Amino acid sequence: MDEQPEPAQTAGGLDRRAELSEFLRTRRARLKPEDVGLPDFGRRRVPGLRREELAQLAGVSVAYYTRLEQGNGRNVSAEVLDAIARALRLNDAEHAHLMHLAKPKQHKKKPVTRSQQVRPALRHLLDSIESVPAYIVGRRSDVLAWNRMASALFGDWAEVPAQERNWARMVFLRPEYRELFVEWEQKASDIVGYLRMDAGCHPDDPRLSALVGELSVKSEEFRRLWAAHDVKEKSYGVKRLRHPLVGDLTLSFETFRLVDDGEQSLITYHAEPDTPSAEALRLLASWGADATRSGTRASTPSE
């Protein structure tokens, strides 16, 4: 079994320079010369483009790009980063992640150790949504608040200790979630991609670093996915679930990032009208009203 590299960490969080270095290296390794219109001369000792080829595509010197890939992005301009992102064929999420790593924002942020608070009005909104599973997720993929339908669909989160009420911990460490998500591997990959984006924005978050360390020790799958340095932003899509009470469901999910707190998002799941999945949700709504408590009242602020 191949050994996966340990996450690069400092005493207070993840090592931004090491993260930048590994991210650029893994993005370069996935490209072939023919992908970017370059001739392929001879056998390559390592996969992907050579540094000099990437530098040529980006229009910078090899020495300059090498310093950047070694984690020294202190004086790099946004224009150069844009050129490197184009050369590496980065998508929007990857481009944003590169900017976070190479040029961290200098404006004052809320302390990363501050408790994540959900506004009372949002809790009331969740309570009022009776037929759609909905919840609010914050930093580190922490589940902060939810409604009865979310409990009916995903399990009663009020019974889960607050420090374990986290998507990454639940997906990788709780066997019932392997059964719940039909494409568990895709769900796991998505969660790691979200955590990578979070790490780029908050590499000094000691709790995020501790979470990554814990999952790296306890889950070989997490170690493998984390080492790939793939990033993803929460958006929308379709998930297939296999619920122990109502069977298979195909549900669309939507993500609504809060305007007043970009680190919190409202996630909803819904079924197409007049489908077996819609009927299954209707049954869950009836069952959930009797069998679960409202997570929006039971939840506590995430530390």
Image (cartoon, rainbow, N blue to C red):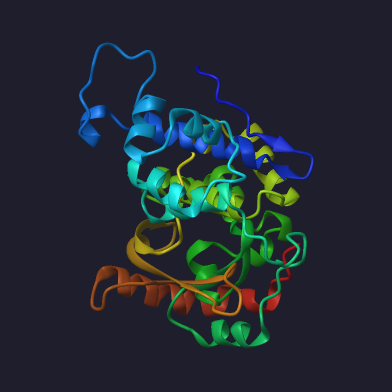
95 relative to 266 in the view: left or right:
left
189 relative to 70 in the view: left or right:
left
Position of the C terminus, as image quadrant, is bottom right
Query: With respect to residue 164, does 299 lie above or below?
Result: below
Q: Nearer the viewer, residue 122 or 41?
A: 41
Q: Position of residue 108 (x, y in %)?
A: 72, 67
Query: With respect to residue 57, does 86 lie above or below?
Result: below
138 relative to 281 in the view: left or right:
right
Q: Nearer the viewer, residue 138 or 167?
A: 138
Q: Position of residue 272 (x, y in %)?
A: 27, 74
Residue at the location (47% across, 31% down)? 25
- Can residue 113 be seen from the camera position used here? yes
Name the quadrant containing residue 262: bottom right
Q: Nearer the viewer, residue 66 or 188?
A: 66
- Can residue 194 be seen from the camera position used here? no
Label total for image: 0
Q: Nearer the viewer, residue 157 or 86?
A: 86
Residue at the location (56% across, 47% down)? 102
Name the quadrant containing residue 248: bottom left
Q: Position of residue 181 (x, y in %)?
A: 42, 52
Q: Position of residue 51 (x, y in %)?
A: 41, 27
